[in-house]
Each structure stands twice: as C-alpha cells, then as structure tokens.
Image: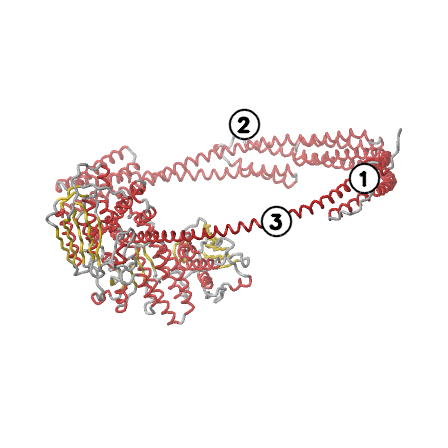
C-alpha cells in the first residue's frame, strides 16, 4: 500500500528534482512557441542567402575579369565564365518573376566576357609576332657585340703580354746593373788585396761573389730565348770560376787574383752582350705597342655604334611593354619614333660587321618592318579589349543592383518572423520567472534555514561552549542526520574535557619528579667540570711547551735562511752580471772567484744541514778506518792557522807523540774537528789565541781539546750549547753568523763514536771544548756499498776548510771595501753625483754592493748601524742601502732613527735582508723604509730601486721648493696627488720584482729550509725515503744553471718600474707648463695605455680586492698625447677606487670600455659600482675646488676635464644616483687641432 510522506521528510535530492521538472516543462512550452516563428524566418533567410550567392558570383566574375585585364591570366577569365554560369544556375531557388529579369542581364554579361577572350587571343598572337621580331633583332645585336668583344679581348691580351714583357726587360736591366756593380766591387777588392794584402778586402770580395749566383738565376727567368740562354750559361760559368778563385785567394794571392780578374773581365763582356740584346728587344716591343693602339681604336668605334643600336632595341622593348600595360596614343607614337631610328641605324651599320643573324634569312630592316605591322594589329586588338571590358563592367553593375534588391526584400521578411518569435519568448519567460521564485522560497524554507541554525550551533561548540542548545533532529532527511551527529560530538567533547583535567594532575606529578632528577645531574656535572678544568690547565702547559719548541724551530729556519741567502746572492748576482754582459768585464775573474767562494760556503752550509738531519734521524753509521792523528790534525791545523792569521789571531797545535794511528770514522772525525776549530776562530777577537791539543788518556782513549781566548760563555747559556735549534745570540744584532746546529752535530757524532763532549768557560776568559774518543781497534768487516756511499764523507778541500774557518765577515783578498771617506775630495769631478751609503756587516757583501753602485754614484760604506749613523752626522748622503741583521745597531733600528730625526726624515732608505716573507717586508716598511729587497736579488733590481728612490726624492724636493717659491700650493698638491698615484705603481712594480726574486727557482734553499721544518721530526726518513728528499742534493747543485732564464722577466718588470718613475717627471713637467697648451703626440697602442694606468694603481686596487673588467675593441695604433691621457686615467681609477671604499653589499668592480666613436675619436669609459653621485652634485663635479671627501682638494677631476679640453676632447659623467655607481666617458678626437711638439 502506497504511503505519502510530507515534503519536509523527503530527501533534498527529491525536492530539487521536482523543482527542476517544473522548469523543464515550462522551457518545453517556450520552445514550441519559438519553433513556429522560426519556420517562416528560415524560408526568408534561404531566399536572401541564394540572392547573396548570386551577387557574390557576379562580383567574383567582375573581379576575375579585372584581374585578367591587369595580368592577362587566362585562368582568371575561365573562372569568371564559370561564376556567371553558377549565378545563372542559382536562379531556380528564387521567385520566378525576379529570376526572369535577372537571367537576361546575366546572359549579356557572359557574351561580353566571350568578346573579351577573343580580343585577348588576338593580342597574344601579335605579342608573339613582336617578340619573334625583337628576338631576331637582339640576336643580331649580340652577334655584333660578341665579335667586337672578342676583338677587344684579343687586343687586351696582347697588351697584357706586352706589359709583362716590358716589366721583365726593365727587371733584366736592373739585374744587369747589379751584376756590373758586383763585378766592379769584386775587381776593386781583389786589386786592393793584391796591392795592400788587406784580408778585409778579400772578405768583401768573397761576400760579393756569394751574392752573384742568385742574381744570375733571376736573370735566367726573365730572358728565355736560346741565344740568351747560351750567354747566360757562359755568364754562370764565369761567375762560378771567379767565385772559386776568390775563395782560394789566400792560398796563392797573385795566381788566384789574376785568375779571378780574368774571369771577372769575361763576366763584364757577357753583361755587355746581354745589354745589346736587350736593346734590340726594346725596339720590337715599341713597334708592337703602335699596332695594339691602332687596332684598339677601330674596335672602340664599332663598339660605340653597336651599343647605340642595342640601347634603342632595349628602349623599344620597354616602350612596347609599357603600351601593353597601359595603352595610350603617346606611347604608340614613341614606339613609332624608335622604329624609325632603328631603321636608320640598320642602314648605317655595314653588313660585314655581322649584323645579320645566322639563324634568320631576313635582314634587320625586314625585322623592323614586321615589328611595325604586328604592333599596329596589337594596337587595334587593344582597343577591342577596352570596349569589351566596359561592357562587362556595365552588365555586372546592372545584375548586382537586381540581386541586391531581391536580397533586401528577403531580409525584411526574415525580420518580421523574428519579431513574432521574440514576443512569444517574453511571455513564456515571465511565467518561468514566477515559477522559479516559488521554487526558491520553498528551498529557503525547508533547506537553507535549518542548515544556518545548525552551522551557528557548531561554531559555538568549536569556541568551547559545550552547553549550546541544538535544534530538534526529528526530520528524516540529510539535515536531520547531521543534527544528530553534532549532538553525538557534543557529548564526546564533554567526556574528553573530564579526561583532560585528570591528565593535567598526573602531568604535574611527573614534572616535580623530573626537577629532582635535574638537580641531582647538575651536581654531578659540576664535579666533572672541575676535573676538566684541571685537565685544561695541563693541556695549556703542554701547548706552551710545544709553542716554545716550534718557536725554536722557526728561529732555526729563519737563521738557516739568512745563512743560505747571503752566499746565494753573491753567487747569482755576479753570474747574472757576467751572463748579461756582451763582453767579459775587466773584473770577471774577481766575479768568478766570488761566486765560487760563496758556492763552496753554501755547500758547507747545506752539508751541515744534511748531516744534522741524518744525525737527528739516527741514520749515521760508522765506517772505521785507520787514521794518522798527527797527519790529519796537523794538516787541518795548518789550514786553520792561515785563516786565524788573516783575522789577526794566533793558532797553535800540540799532538801527543804517543798517539799514532787510531781506528775511527775519518769523515766524522773531520766534521768534529772542523766545527770546534771554526767556532774557536769565530769567537776569538783580533790579537787572541787558539790552542789545539791532542793528548792520550788512560783506558785506550784520547782527548781533543780546543782552547780559545774569546768572549766566553755565560753559565746560564752552557746547557743550551749542544741543544738542537739553539743559538746563544739569535737576534738581528748578533755579532757572529751560523746555523746553530754545529755543536749539536758534534755531540751526536761523538756519542755515535762512543765518546763524550764537554765545555769549560768563563765569560770574558774564553772557552775550552774537549772531546774524548776511544782509540778503537782494527775492524775485519768491510762496510756495505750502500753504507760506504752514503755515510763515508769525502775529505774536505783546502778551500772548503778555509771557508769553514772563515765566518764570511772578514772578506777575502779580492774584496776591497772602501772606508768611510770623502770621495768627492778624492775625485772632484764626481762631486755632483748622488751619494749612496752602503751598510753591511759582511765585508764580501759590502764590497759587492759597493762595486755595483760605484760607477753611478759616490759610495760610502759602514759595517754596522752605529758607524752609519755617525757617518750621516759628518757627510751629506742622498740614499742609504742597509742590511737588516747587523751587530750593534741593526737595519730596522737605523731606519727608525733616521726617520725619527727631523734632519734626515726625507732621506730614502732601502733595506736588504736574507729573511724573506711578508712579515719581514711589513716590519721593514713599518719602520719607515722606502723600499725592501729580499736576498737573493738581481743587480739590475738593486740599481733600479736606487734610481727610483733617488728620482722620487728629487721630485718631491723640487716640488716643495717650487711650491714655496711660486706660491702654487694648489698645483703642488695636485702634483703630489698624481705622483702618489704613480708611486703606488712604482712600489708595486718593485714589489713584483722582489716577488719574482722570492719565487725564483734560486730561492729553492728557502723552500728546502721550510721542507726541513715541516719534516723536523722525521727529517732523516724524508731525505732518504721521500722522492723530494732524495732529489734535494742534486737540486741544490743545479740552482745556478737555471737562474739566467729568469732574469729576462725581472728586467722587463724593472723597465716598467723605470717607466713609472719617468711618468712622474712627465706629470711634474705637465703641471709646470699647465698654462701653455703643448701636446706631445705619440703613436700609442690603446690596450697598453690602459694597462699602464692599471699597473700604476695596482697597489691600491689589490688592497681593496677590486675586480677589473676590460672590454677593448680591436683598435689600431693611434696618435695621442700619451701622458695626458694616462694622467686622466690614473685620476679616474683613483676616484673610482675611493668611491668603492664604502661598498659592502657587492663585490667592488671597475669596468674599462675602449672603442672608436664618430668624429673620429677615441672613447674610453671608466665605470664603477661604488657610492655613485647625488643629483645635486652632478653639475659641480668638474668644478675647481669641489669635493665630497674630507681629505680631498677638489682639483683631480677639474684637472682631468681641463686636460681633455686641451686635447680638443671632453670628459663627461653619468650616475643614476647615490649607491648606483658612476660612469666617466673620455672622448679624445684623433684629428683635433693640438699644439704638437
């Protein structure tokens, strides 16, 4: 049984479905009403559509006819006929009355199109006839032109051959002159040799003979007739015979000389014969030239006449084409006049020239007559075509008007049907709107309002109000289901709130328990911290001990570097002087001796280091052998006595007679003896004594004792004597040289040989070193080959022992050091030269530096800083060149004292040091030194540095004096600003030279010391097992061979340094003559100019890590005022660098762009990404005195702008504002009016 539910209990989908069904029914009714109106409208539209198609066909046919008239396209005419036929066929779809009237008009249109086609066919036929006649006339013209062209080509070829022949004859005449002059020179030199016996004359004759055979071969290439070839063969034979006689002139001068003169006379005769033959050839060549000129004239006249005929034929074709495209009486008259002129030309041209074409039997005149008749028929057909075209247009216009009228009537009928349908649609739409309103009210009543109420209750629940009342859920649809679900959610939320309260109480209990555990853990951590702090104190103490050991090693490396670099300088510098000299200098023997002596000294130092490394690693092995103590010690004592005598002290020796031959390692024993005796001589002053004693002891032992009367050793220093890396005095003012490993090596060798070493000393009373060794017993075993090769040392040479005893501070017989004196008094002619003070405690280095400078300067010398300071009080000095490590007062102290004195603050100081590295350079410059040179250095570098500081000092002195005298403080400030920019470059160039020396292969010894320091704990394994360590000895011996190759780069950098100093002079001169616009124009490569400016500013750019980008076009060499442009670029770089000083959010960058601009002009732009320029400052940026910097003087950019104007150019600036960078553009005209010097 069916039951009926209320609407509110039905599902929402059912409710919506009922509403949609009602709307669909209503829309179906509206559609039926519209269908009736649409049927009538379709009939009217169909009639209008057919009328439009007929009208389109008529218009299309008219367009195709117009296209055919314009292009003569037959396809367009066929399409027009088809479109008219289509229009006639479409008449069946429109009412009969309208179709009958329209059909007559369409039939007449089709007849006009057919008449148009007939006229077109007639015109095409006549066009072909005219084309045929024109082609035959053109063909005849081409034949004439080809004949004339071939004739001219033959004449031109003959003329080219004639010109080549003339050139060969002229070259042959010149070569004959060369042969005649060579024959005369050889004859004169042979005669002079026979008369005077001068060997230089014979040499000149041989050189001249060597040049003749190639000349004869060149002549053979230009003279190719058989008769000429025969004479040339005779000439080559005579030249070869003369050359052979001259070559052996020294063996039998008279015989060979006569033979040479005879052959040379034959050469002269043959040259005369060749000149006669060339004269005959000249006459033939002149006759050929006349024939060529006559033939050329005849052919030129025929060509002119043929050209006129061809031009008129081309004009005829153009006029005919113009008439075809646009027929007119004027064009037809022009065509007739052209045909008349062609008839006259055809009668004038002779038939023998070839005007009649081979392919046409008719003459040219016949072709012209035929062309005239065809053109008349074409003109008549063109008139018929114009009449047919007018008829087509009229009939098409008439048909179009009829079709347009029919179409308008059909559109009116369709609009009426459309109005009726719109009225019915409005009525049905109103009913649909009413029905939709009813459906909307029902949907709001039963669906929207309950959903809004339920959503409000859910928002209150989400806010935490769990007591919210929820509407009744008695409905059976989806809204009732959601209401019941929300109530279940409310009940669950109330239960969860109760559970949360219980969980919070439990959390508080757990937190209290955790706080107790944290307190207990904190107490435990405090106890562990106390333990760690105690361990940290122990680690700090261990670190301090390690730092002390490392410092000792660092001092050792620095000392070794000093001991190695000084002799290395005295090796490389003399060798460089000798290698760069074109002839051996007068003192070449002294230079070679100095290099050899220091090479041996360097070998001793290296051997000490290698021996010490072996001893430290425990790699020494004993190679016992019988040694005669009397002989071994006696020979060494004799060598030591000679060195001691040269120092002014006495060495004596006593050997116990009971001691004879003992068994010990002779090499190790010699090292021990050499180290002890050399130390005694080193620390014994002049007038002191050294005693060497060898005595026998009980128990098969003997003692070697070395007693000196030197300075002695303090008691607190005695424990340090035999420690590694330790020296009693390791300061820069120490009095004695050495590496500090000699006594440590002695201790290791003595202990290896089973002995002991000790010392007794009192300060001021000398010291006594003693060594006690066992006498040893004869060994039956023979050391292995490896042990013998690596451990047994070869006996030292006498020269090596002398250098071992001499510490290098006493010089040699060949080193003469000038004492402080008044050189200008001894040599009055040198009174105007600059005065240089050289300070060095090494006599050999002092002598060498003085020799390098004495030819250019007045040189005074001092052996320490105190003596140099005293000399400065007595004598005027222009520059000081000082060593750093010296006794009494070192170089740094001397520099600081000079710069602190008001009277000497301006005096430039150059420091020489054997301690390389950046820290040493910084400390030297901080003390006030003007320049810093690391050993080893190049002689050219030293001279260039001295010249540079003297020039800079002189320029600054002149600037200050002239500024005070003339009152030009502003100009002086500008000059100093520009000079400062260049001085930065000079310092950088000098630093580059020094850097090249520091990175030279010759500095390998410094790297050796660094490697040894890195492997100080495994030095022996490094030297015997590591690949680099094995190559170390051979590497040291080959250093001198590779130094020469590095000198060229240093010389080039020194030239750049000199260029920078010269530029200072130019800046000063430019400022001095600023009121006179004088331009020194030079041919300059622009990339090199920009590189010079960057090089002069390299120091400041490098210090700020500025990136430089160059975009330079491929420019030729340009004539510019080099120094003015360079001055502007240096100032712009300085300005950009200062603008980049405050940039922190981007990488500083300067961009150079060079190209050619209109004018022509050179355009260089300098752009930076710095602070930019404020808009209010743009107008004043080049004004005199304007500046935005506290330390600025406001003249740099002003002077740049003035310099640009004086060169006829301009300097402009652009900036987008503060923080946006700035771009300066320099334009220099390449043809500007400049006062050139």
Frontmost of labels 2 and 1 is 1
Q: Could you tell whether 572 is left or right of 1216 in the image?
A: left
Where is residue 257? Give x, y as percent.
Answer: 15, 42
**Residue 1037, image quadrant:** top left
Residue found 17% across the figure and 36% down from its top: 780
Q: How is the image coloured?
A: secondary structure
Marks 2/3 in contact by CB < 8 Å: the verdict is no
Q: Secondary structure at mark 2?
A: loop
Q: Is residue 40 visible in this depiction of the protein?
A: no
Q: Which residue is nearer to you in this view: 608 or 1216? A: 608
- Give me the C-alpha separation between circle 3 and circle 1: 47 Å
**Residue 414, image quadrant:** top right
Where is residue 1146? Give x, y as percent.
Answer: 51, 53
Q: Earlier in the sequence, mark 2 or mark 3?
A: 2
Where is residue 181? Give x, y as percent.
Answer: 24, 45
Crowd class of label 2 (few under 14; some 14 to 19; many from 20; radius 10 Å):
few
Q: Earlier in the sequence, mark 3 or mark 1?
A: 1
Mark 1 highlights which residue? 480
Query: In the rendering, which numbered label is found on residue 511?
Result: 3
Residue found 38% across the figure and 51% down from its top: 542
Mark 2 highlights which residue? 361
The C terminus appears in which quarter of the rendering? bottom left
Marks 3/1 in contact by CB < 8 Å: the verdict is no
Marks 2/1 in contact by CB < 8 Å: the verdict is no
The N terminus appears in which quarter of the rendering? top right
Q: Secondary structure at mark 1?
A: helix
- Give me the C-alpha separation between circle 2 and circle 1: 116 Å
Q: Which residue is nearer to you in this view: 1050 or 689? A: 689
Q: Secondary structure at mark 3?
A: helix
Where is residue 985? Give x, y as percent.
Answer: 38, 57
């Amino acid at each position: 049984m069916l039951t009926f539910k209320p609407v509110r209990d039905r599902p929402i989908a059912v409710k919506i479905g009922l509403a949609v069904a009602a709307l669909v029914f209503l829309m179906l009714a509206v559609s039926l009403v519209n269908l009736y109106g649409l049927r009538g409208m379709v009939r009217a539209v169909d009639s209008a559509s057919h009328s439009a198609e007929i009208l389109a066909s008529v218009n299309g046919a008219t367009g195709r006819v117009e296209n055919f008239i314009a292009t003569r396209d037959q396809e367009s005419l066929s399409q027009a006929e088809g479109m008219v036929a289509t229009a006639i066929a479409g008449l069946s779809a429109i009412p009969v009355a309208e179709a009958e009237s329209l059909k007559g008009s369409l039939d007449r249109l089709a007849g006009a199109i057919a008449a148009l086609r007939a006229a077109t066919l007639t015109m095409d036929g006549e066009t072909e006839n005219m084309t045929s006649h024109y082609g035959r006339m053109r063909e005849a013209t081409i034949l004439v032109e080809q004949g004339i062209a071939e004739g001219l080509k033959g004449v031109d070829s003959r003329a080219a051959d004639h010109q080549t022949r003339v050139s060969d004859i002229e070259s042959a005449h010149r070569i004959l002159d060369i042969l005649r002059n060579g024959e005369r020179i050889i004859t004169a030199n042979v005669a002079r040799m026979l008369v005077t016996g001068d060997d230089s004359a014979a040499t000149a004759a041989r050189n001249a003979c060597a040049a003749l055979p190639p000349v004869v071969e060149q002549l053979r290439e230009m003279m190719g007739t058989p008769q000429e070839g025969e004479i040339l063969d005779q000439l080559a034979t005579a030249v070869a015979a003369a050359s052979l006689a001259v070559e052996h002139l020294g063996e039998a001068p008279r015989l060979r000389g006569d033979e040479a003169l005879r052959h040379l006379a034959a050469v002269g005769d043959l040259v005369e014969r060749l000149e006669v033959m060339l004269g005959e050839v000249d006459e033939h060549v002149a006759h050929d030239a006349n024939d060529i000129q006559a033939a050329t004239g005849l052919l030129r006249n025929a060509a002119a006449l043929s050209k006129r005929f061809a031009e008129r034929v081309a004009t005829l074709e153009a006029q005919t084409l113009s008439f075809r495209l646009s027929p007119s009486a004027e064009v037809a008259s022009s065509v007739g006049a052209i045909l008349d002129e062609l008839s006259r030309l055809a009668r004038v041209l002779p038939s023998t020239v070839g005007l009649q074409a081979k392919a046409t039997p008719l003459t040219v005149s016949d072709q012209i007559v035929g062309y005239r008749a065809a053109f008349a028929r074409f003109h008549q057909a063109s008139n018929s075509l114009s009449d047919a075209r007018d008829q087509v247009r009229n009939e098409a216009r008439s048909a179009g008007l009829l079709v347009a009228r029919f179409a308008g009537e059909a559109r009116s009928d369709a609009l009426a049907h459309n109005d009726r349908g719109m009225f019915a649609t409005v009525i049905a739409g109103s009913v649909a709107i009413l029905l939709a309103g009813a459906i909307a009210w029902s949907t709001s009543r039963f669906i929207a309002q309950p959903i809004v109420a339920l959503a409000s209750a859910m928002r209150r629940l989400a806010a935490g109000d769990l007591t919210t009342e929820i509407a009744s859920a008695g409905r059976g649809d989806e809204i009732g289901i959601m209401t019941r679900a929300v109530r279940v959610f409310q009940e669950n939320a109330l239960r969860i709130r109760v559970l949360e309260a219980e969980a919070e109480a439990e959390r508080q209990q757990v937190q209290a328990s955790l706080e107790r555990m944290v307190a207990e853990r904190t107490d435990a951590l405090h106890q562990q911290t106390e333990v760690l702090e105690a361990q940290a104190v122990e680690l700090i103490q261990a670190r301090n001990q390690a730092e002390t050991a490392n410092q000792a090693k660092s001092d050792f490396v620095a000392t070794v570097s000093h001991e190695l670099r000084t002799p290395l300088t005295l090796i490389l510098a003399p060798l460089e002087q000798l290698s760069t000299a074109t002839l051996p200098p007068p003192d070449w023997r002294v230079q070679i001796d100095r290099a050899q002596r220091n090479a041996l000294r360097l070998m001793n130092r290296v051997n000490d280091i290698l021996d010490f490394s072996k001893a430290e690693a425990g790699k020494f092995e004993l190679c016992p052998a019988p040694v005669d103590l009397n002989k071994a010690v006696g020979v060494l004592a004799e060598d030591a006595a000679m060195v001691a005598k040269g120092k002014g002290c006495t060495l004596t020796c006593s050997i116990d007679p009971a001691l004879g031959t003992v068994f010990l390692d002779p090499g190790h024993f010699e090292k021990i003896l050499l180290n002890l005796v050399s130390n005694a001589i080193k620390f014994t002053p002049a007038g002191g004594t050294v005693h060497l004693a060898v005595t026998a002891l009980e128990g098969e032992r003997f003692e070697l004792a070395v007693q000196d009367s030197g300075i002695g050793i303090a008691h607190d220093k005695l424990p340090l004597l035999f420690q590694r890396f330790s020296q009693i005095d390791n300061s820069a003012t120490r009095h004695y040289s050495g590496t500090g490993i000699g006594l440590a090596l002695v201790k290791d060798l003595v202990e290896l040989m089973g002995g002991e070493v000790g010392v007794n000393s009192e300060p001021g009373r000398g010291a006594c070193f003693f060594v006690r060794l066992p006498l040893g017993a004869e060994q039956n075993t023979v050391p292995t080959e490896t042990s013998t090769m690596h451990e047994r040392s070869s006996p030292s040479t006498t020269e090596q022992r002398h250098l071992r005893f001499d510490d290098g501070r006493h010089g040699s017989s060949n080193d003469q050091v000038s004492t402080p004196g008044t050189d200008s008094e001894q040599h009055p002619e040198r009174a105007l030269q600059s005065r240089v003070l050289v300070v060095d405690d090494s006599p050999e280095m002092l002598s060498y530096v003085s020799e390098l400078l004495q030819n250019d300067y007045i040189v005074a010398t001092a052996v320490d800083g105190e003596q140099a300071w005293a000399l400065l009080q007595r004598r005027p000095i222009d520059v000081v060149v000082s060593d750093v490590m010296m006794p009494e007062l070192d170089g740094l102290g001397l520099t600081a004292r000079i710069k602190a004195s008001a009277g000497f603050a301006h005096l430039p100081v150059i420091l020489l040091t054997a301690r390389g590295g950046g820290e040493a350079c910084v400390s030297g410059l901080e003390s006030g030194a003007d320049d810093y040179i690391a050993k080893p250095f190049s002689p050219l570098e030293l001279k260039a540095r001295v010249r540079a500081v003297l020039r800079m000092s002189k320029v600054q002195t002149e600037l200050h004096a002239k500024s005070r005298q003339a009152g030009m403080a502003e100009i002086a400030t500008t000059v100093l600003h520009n000079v400062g920019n260049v001085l930065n470059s000079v310092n950088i160039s000098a630093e580059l030279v020094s850097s090249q020396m520091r990175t030279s292969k010759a500095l390998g010894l410094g790297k050796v010391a660094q490697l040894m320091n890195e492997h100080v704990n495994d030095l022996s394994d490094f030297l015997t097992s590591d690949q680099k360590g094995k190559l170390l000895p051979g590497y040291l011996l080959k250093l001198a061979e590779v130094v020469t190759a590095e000198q060229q780069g240093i010389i080039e950098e020194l030239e750049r340094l000199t260029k920078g100093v010269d530029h200072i002079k130019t800046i000063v001169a430019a400022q001095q003559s600023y009121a006179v616009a004088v331009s020194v124009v030079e041919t300059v490569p622009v990339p090199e100019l920009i590189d010079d400016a960057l090089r002069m500013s390299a120091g400041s750019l490098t210090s700020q890590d500025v990136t430089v980008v160059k975009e330079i076009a491929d420019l030729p060499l340009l004539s510019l005022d080099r120094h003015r442009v360079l001055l502007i670029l240096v100032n712009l770089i300085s300005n950009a660098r200062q603008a980049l000083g405050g940039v922190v959010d981007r990488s500083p960058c300067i961009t150079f762009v060079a190209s050619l601009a209109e004018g022509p002009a050179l355009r260089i732009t300098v752009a930076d990404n710095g602070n930019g320029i404020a808009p209010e400052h743009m107008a004043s940026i080049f004004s005199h005195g304007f500046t935005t910097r506290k330390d600025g003087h406001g003249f740099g950019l002003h002077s740049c702008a003035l310099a640009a104007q004086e060169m006829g150019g301009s300097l402009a600036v652009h900036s987008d504002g503060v923080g946006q960078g700035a771009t300066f553009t320099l334009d220099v005209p390449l043809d500007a009016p400049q006062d050139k010097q």
